[in-house]
Amino acid sequence: MSPQLRPLRKREDMPDFVREALDARGLRENYDARPPYQRNDYLLWINKVKREETKRKHLEQMLDELESGGVYMGMTWTGDR
């Protein structure tokens, strides 16, 4: 299948606790500035786990990365290529 015909991944919904955490830390603008694939990947990473403790751990990593900038899922990121 050619790349342009591959089905897109399901768009993840943002849970209220993620929205509230972004607002509480003043990071909504940083989140919105990330490319759509990153925003969706972060939400998938948070949404797919079952344990609340793991969800919170993933959320905290996302918030820390958005706050520091230059990091995406533990990897160096210098902007959309």
Image (cartoon, helix red, strand yellow):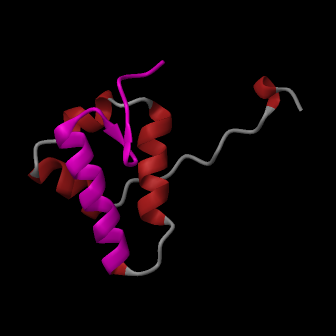
Quadrant location, the N terminus: top right
Spot the residue most to the front.
Answer: 76
Residue placed at 50% from the left, 36% from the top?
A: 37
Residue interval drawn in magenta: 53-81
69 relative to 52, above or below: above
Asked if the magenta segment contains residue 69, the reply would be yes
Number of numbered discs overlaid on the protein picture: 0
Spot the residue most to the top.
Answer: 81
Give left or right: position of 25 versus 43. left
Spot the residue most to the right.
Answer: 1
6 relative to 51, above or below: above
Near-viewer residue (28 or 34): 34
Near-viewer residue (38 or 74): 74
Asked if the magenta segment contains residue 30, the reply would be no
Residue placed at 42% from the left, 29% from the top?
A: 35
Near-viewer residue (36 or 81): 81
Q: Quadrant of residue 34?
A: top left
Residue placed at 38% from the left, 54% from the top?
A: 14
Residue placed at 19% from the left, 57% from the top?
A: 20
Residue 3, position in %: x, y? 78, 27
